[in-house]
Amino acid sequence: MKQWLQEEKQKLSQLIQNYTDTRIDWINISSQLGTRTPLQCKLQYRHVLHPRKYPDQTNHIWTDEESRQLMMLIKIYGHKWKYIKTNHFQHLTTEQLRMKQNQINNKRQQYKQIVQKSERGFPLTQSEAEFMQIALREINMMKQKLDNINGDCPVIIQLDPLEIKYYNQFSQQKQLEIEREELKVIELLKQFKENIEK
């Protein structure tokens, strides 16, 4: 998604002023703006132009279990945000679910880029090494949590039988991925340390 231009932000703010007493019609605003979708207009307004008006929608602290459950539900249901929200995350908005998925995907993308760069023979920078050390800590925490998951895990209690089946498959697959990623990260950090010592 391209960045918002200053003119777009100003026009969006002006268009929203027409809705001081009524519910904001994002479809109408989008068509008047002409360059953005209704959802893009809504997110820009709520999270950039007026975040203080919607503090509860940005301040949720996600647990590892919630993050894992969200990604597992997305694998099962796709981007059916209203369904996922209604049945599993009533306390969050659909925007928060989307934002969390984007955050997780961005982190994965950054991780993959560092791994690919290293595989092409380029040494890690200090900031990339720090990122990988954090990734290693997170991998170890995930391993511990997956080792401790059992039938009365809070996440599993909320799931129906089909979701439990997928959750178990997802957990096993995640365990294998985590072990592979751990080995990669350890190797990259070892190479980084060797490069520094040279």
Image (spheres, rainbow, N blue to C red):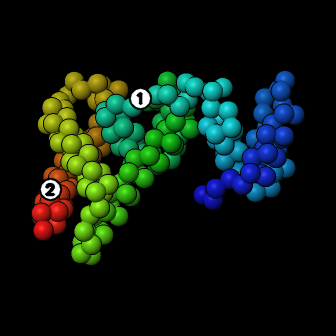
Residue at the spot x=14%, y=56% of the render? 186
User: Label 1 belongs to which residue?
Assistant: 61
Residue at the spot x=53%, y=31% of the render? 58
Which label is found at residue 191? none
Q: Amino acid at mark 2?
A: Ile
Residue 134: image location, x then y, percent? 26, 45
Residue 106: image location, x then y, percent? 42, 53
Element type at mark 2: helix
Q: Report the side of 135 relative to 32 (left or right).
A: left
Residue 196: image location, x then y, percent? 17, 63
Looking at this view, is 113 or 41 the one in front?
113
Query: Does 165 sit above or below residue 148?
Result: below
Q: Amino acid at mark 1?
A: Ile
User: Label 2 belongs to which residue?
Assistant: 186
Residue furthest to the right in view is 18
Residue furthest to the front in view is 198
Look at the numbered discs 2 and 1 and tell me whether their residues touch, using CB distance below 8 Å.
Answer: no
Give residue 49's quadrant in the image. top right
- Nearest to viewer (mark 2 / mark 1): 2
User: How many numbered circles does the render carry?
Assistant: 2
Element type at mark 1: loop
Q: Quadrant of the N terminus?
A: bottom right
Q: Quadrant of the C terminus?
A: bottom left
Query: Does 194 sit above or below residue 69?
Result: below
